[in-house]
Image: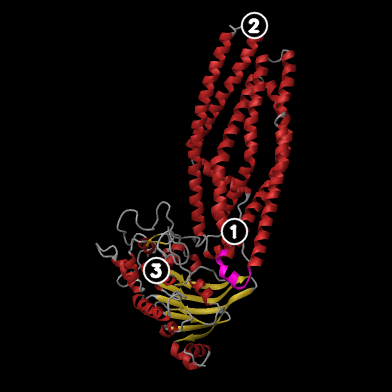
C-alpha cells in the first residue's frame, strides 16, 4: 500500500478567483477581445434584420422587387465579410491573451513547485507531481487555447443577440425564456457533480503515473524478486480505477447534453408560434417576427458551442485547481516578521554564518507512530569535522537531512548559530548548509554549464548565453545540493576568487580538487553532457556533483555517502583533497567507510535512532564499545 500523501487541491472559490485575477491583469487586451467579438456578433445581426424588412416590404407590395433583393443580398455579403474579418482579429487577439495568461500561470506553477520543501515532494510521490506538471498543464493549455476563446465568442454572441431581440420586439424575447427552467435545473445537477468527477479522473491518472514510474525505476528489483505479476496487477487496478472515473464523467455528460440539446430547440418553435399570434393581432410586425426567429435560430450555434465546451472547461478548471493546490502546499522558509528582503532577519543570518549547528531533543518520524530519531542532542562547533557512522537503518541519513534543513523535527529544535533552520529562507539556508548525497544529476547542456549552475554569476562563461543561471527558460538545479552564491559578508574559501582573464581557472581548480580535471579537460568544458550528449559514468557524475559543491562554497556541508560510487582508493584521495580545500568549513560526513571517521575530529555512532557514542576516533576505539567493534570489523578482525 502506498504511503504517499497527495498534494492539496485548491477549493473552487479560490480557483475561480485566481482565474479572474489572471484575466484582469491584462484589462486592455481583454477589453479589446470582448469589443472585437461584440462587433463581429453585431455584424451577424444585420442579415436577419435586412431579411425581415425585405419580407415586410414584399408582403405590403412595396419596394422595387429585384432591385431590393439585390441590395439586400449585397449588404448581407458585405456584413458577412466584415464579420469574418472581425472574428479573425478577435480570435487572434484572444489567442495572444490566452498564451500570455498561460505563460504567467506556468511560470507561477514552476515557482510554486520549486518552493515546495523536498520533504513535501517526497511525501507526495513522483506520480502526483509529474501528472500535475505534464498532464494538468496540457489539459489547461488546451482549455485556454480552444475552449475559453470559443466560449467567450459564444457568450458575447448570445448576449448581443438577446439585446437585438429586445430591440426588435420585447414581446418576442419572452419565448426564449421557455428553456431557462430546463437549462437551470440541468446545469445545477451537472455542475454539482462534475467538479469532483473531473478531480477524481485527474487523480486516477496520477496513480497510473506513480505506479508505472515505480515499476520502471525499480525494474531490476522487480525482476530479481519476481514481482512482475504483482506490478502488473497494480497497473491493472490503476487502469480500472481510471476507467471507472472516466466512465462516471462521461455518464454525467450523456445525461446533461441530451437535456440541454432538447431545451435550446424549444425557443425556436415558441418564437414562431407566439410570434405568429402576436403578428395576427397586430402586436408586432412580420419583419420583427422574421428577424426574431432568425436571431433565435442563430442562438443555437453559440449555445451548442457553450455546451460542447462545458466538459473541456470543467476539465480545465479541475486541472487549474490541482496546479493552484501546489501553491497552497506549505512552502520552504516562510519569512518571519522583521525579515529582510531575502526573507530572513539580518542579525539571524549573521549569527548563523559564524556559529555551529545544534540539535536539542530532536525526534523525527516519517509516520506519526514510528520515530526514526529518538531524542538526539548534539552540538557541532564551527569548523568541526564530524563523522556519523552506524548500521543501516540507524537513522544516519535522516539525521543528515534534518541538519541540512530538508526535514523539520517532530519535536525539539535544529539551529545554526542559535537560529532555527526553519526561520531561514531557502536561499539563505542553502547558502549556509549544503547536503550532497550519492543521488546526483547531470543536466542537459555543456560540462561548463553543469559546473556554473552551482554559482551563477560568479564565474562568467566564455560567451553570451553560457551558464545555467537565472534567465528565460532556465531553472537552477533543484534539491538540497543546490547552493546559491554566498551572500554579503561571506568569506570565499582558499583559492576561490576568479582571476581576471581566467574564466575557466576556478572551474579547473574545482575539478582538480575532486580528481576530475584530467577527464574533464580531455572531454572539454564545452562538450555536451546529459540527455543528447556524452554519457558520464556514475563515479564521474559524483565527481561533478562534488565540484559543484566546491564552487558553491557553503560554510557547512553534510556529505551523505558522497563518495560511495568511487573505488575506495579514489574516494580516499578525494576526501583528503577536499579536506585540504575545505579547511575551516564545518563538515558532517555520513559514511560506511570508516577511514572517513578516522580523519574526523569526532565520531558519532548511531543505533536505533539514537547517538550511543560520541568522541574522537582514538578515544572510542579505546573504549571497546560499538565503534571499536565496527573498526575491528572494518579491518577484517573479529
Front one among 227 and 264? 227
- Crowding around mark 2 (Cα neighbors within 10 Å: few <14, some 14 to 19, many 20+) is few
Q: Which mark is residue 61?
A: 2
Residue 556 screen position, x and y as percent? 42, 72
Q: Which mark is residue 544?
A: 3
Q: Which mark is residue 446?
A: none
Residue 441 screen position, x and y as percent? 45, 65
Residue 129 lies, with reference to residue 81, above or below; the image says below
Residue 197 lies, with reference to residue 353, above or below; the image says above
Is residue 344 visible in this depiction of the protein? Answer: no
Residue 415 screen position, x and y as percent? 48, 72
Helix, strand or loop at mark 1: helix
Helix, strand or loop at mark 2: loop
**Direction left: furthest residue:** 501
The magenta span reads 216-227
Front one among 179 and 243? 243
Is residue 514 visible in this depiction of the protein? Answer: yes
Residue 271 lies, with reference to residue 124, above or below; the image says above
- Name the residue tied to disc 1: 209
Helix, strand or loop at mark 3: helix
Amino acid at each position: 500500500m502506498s504511503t504517499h500523501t497527495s498534494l492539496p487541491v485548491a477549493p473552487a472559490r479560490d480557483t475561480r478567483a485566481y482565474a479572474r485575477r489572471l484575466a484582469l491583469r491584462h484589462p486592455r487586451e481583454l477589453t479589446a477581445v470582448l469589443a472585437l467579438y461584440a462587433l463581429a456578433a453585431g455584424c451577424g445581426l444585420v442579415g436577419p434584420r435586412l431579411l425581415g424588412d425585405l419580407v415586410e416590404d414584399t408582403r405590403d407590395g412595396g419596394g422595387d422587387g429585384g432591385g431590393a433583393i439585390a441590395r439586400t443580398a449585397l449588404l448581407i455579403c458585405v456584413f458577412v465579410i466584415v464579420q469574418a474579418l472581425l472574428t479573425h482579429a478577435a480570435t487572434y487577439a484572444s489567442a495572444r491573451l490566452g498564451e500570455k495568461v498561460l505563460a504567467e500561470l506556468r511560470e507561477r506553477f514552476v515557482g510554486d513547485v520549486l518552493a515546495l520543501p523536498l520533504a513535501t515532494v517526497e511525501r507526495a510521490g513522483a506520480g502526483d507531481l509529474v501528472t500535475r506538471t505534464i498532464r494538468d498543464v496540457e489539459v489547461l493549455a488546451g482549455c485556454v487555447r480552444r475552449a475559453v476563446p470559443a466560449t467567450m465568442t459564444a457568450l458575447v454572441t448570445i448576449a448581443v443577440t438577446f439585446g437585438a431581440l429586445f430591440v426588435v420586439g420585447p414581446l418576442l424575447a419572452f419565448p426564449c425564456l421557455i428553456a431557462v427552467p430546463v437549462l437551470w435545473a440541468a446545469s445545477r445537477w451537472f455542475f454539482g457533480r462534475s467538479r469532483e468527477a473531473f478531480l477524481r479522473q485527474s487523480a486516477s491518472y496520477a496513480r497510473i503515473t506513480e505506479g508505472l514510474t515505480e515499476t520502471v525505476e525499480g525494474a531490476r528489483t522487480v525482476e530479481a524478486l519476481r514481482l512482475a505479476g504483482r506490478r502488473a496487477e497494480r497497473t491493472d487496478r490503476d487502469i480500472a480505477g481510471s476507467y471507472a472515473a472516466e466512465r462516471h464523467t462521461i455518464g454525467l455528460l450523456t445525461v446533461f447534453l441530451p437535456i440541454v440539446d432538447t431545451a435550446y430547440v424549444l425557443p425556436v418553435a415558441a418564437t414562431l408560434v407566439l410570434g405568429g399570434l402576436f403578428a395576427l393581432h397586430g402586436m408586432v410586425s412580420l419583419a420583427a417576427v422574421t428577424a426574431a426567429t432568425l436571431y433565435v435560430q442563430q442562438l443555437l450555434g453559440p449555445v451548442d458551442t457553450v455546451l460542447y465546451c462545458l466538459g473541456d472547461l470543467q476539465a480545465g478548471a479541475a486541472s487549474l485547481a490541482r496546479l493552484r493546490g501546489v501553491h497552497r502546499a506549505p512552502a520552504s522558509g516562510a519569512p518571519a516578521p522583521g525579515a529582510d528582503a531575502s526573507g530572513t532577519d539580518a542579525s539571524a543570518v549573521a549569527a548563523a554564518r559564524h556559529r555551529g549547528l545544534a540539535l536539542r531533543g530532536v525526534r523525527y518520524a516519517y509516520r506519526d507512530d514510528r520515530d526514526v530519531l529518538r531524542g538526539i542532542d548534539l552540538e557541532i562547533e564551527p569548523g568541526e569535522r564530524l563523522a556519523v557512522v552506524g548500521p543501516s537503518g540507524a537513522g544516519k541519513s535522516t539525521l543528515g537531512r534534518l541538519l541540512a534543513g530538508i526535514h523539520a523535527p517532530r519535536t525539539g529544535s535544529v539551529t545554526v548559530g542559535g537560529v532555527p533552520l526553519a526561520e531561514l529562507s531557502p536561499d539563505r539556508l542553502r547558502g549556509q548548509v549544503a547536503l550532497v548525497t550519492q543521488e546526483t544529476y547531470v543536466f542537459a547542456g555543456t560540462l561548463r554549464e553543469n559546473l556554473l549552475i552551482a554559482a551563477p554569476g560568479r564565474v562568467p562563461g566564455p560567451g553570451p548565453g553560457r551558464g545555467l543561471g537565472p534567465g528565460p527558460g532556465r531553472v537552477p538545479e533543484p534539491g538540497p545540493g543546490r547552493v546559491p552564491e554566498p551572500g554579503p559578508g561571506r568569506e570565499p574559501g582558499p583559492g576561490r576568487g576568479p582571476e581576471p582573464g581566467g574564466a575557466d581557472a576556478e572551474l579547473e581548480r574545482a575539478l582538480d580538487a575532486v580528481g576530475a580535471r584530467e577527464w574533464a579537460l580531455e572531454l572539454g568544458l564545452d562538450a555536451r553532457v546529459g540527455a543528447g550528449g556524452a554519457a558520464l559514468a556514475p563515479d564521474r557524475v559524483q565527481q561533478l556533483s562534488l565540484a559543484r559543491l566546491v564552487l558553491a562554497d557553503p560554510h557547512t556541508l553534510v556529505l551523505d555517502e558522497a563518495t560511495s560510487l568511487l573505488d575506495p582508493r579514489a574516494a580516499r584521495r578525494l576526501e583528503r583533497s577536499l579536506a585540504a580545500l575545505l579547511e575551516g568549513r564545518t563538515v558532517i560526513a555520513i559514511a560506511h567507510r570508516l577511514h572517513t571517521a578516522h580523519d574526523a575530529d569526532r565520531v558519532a555512532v548511531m543505533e536505533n535512532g539514537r547517538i550511543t557514542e560520541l568522541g574522537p576516533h582514538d578515544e572510542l576505539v579505546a573504549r571497546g564499545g560499538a565503534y571499536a567493534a565496527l573498526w575491528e570489523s572494518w579491518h577484517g578482525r573479529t
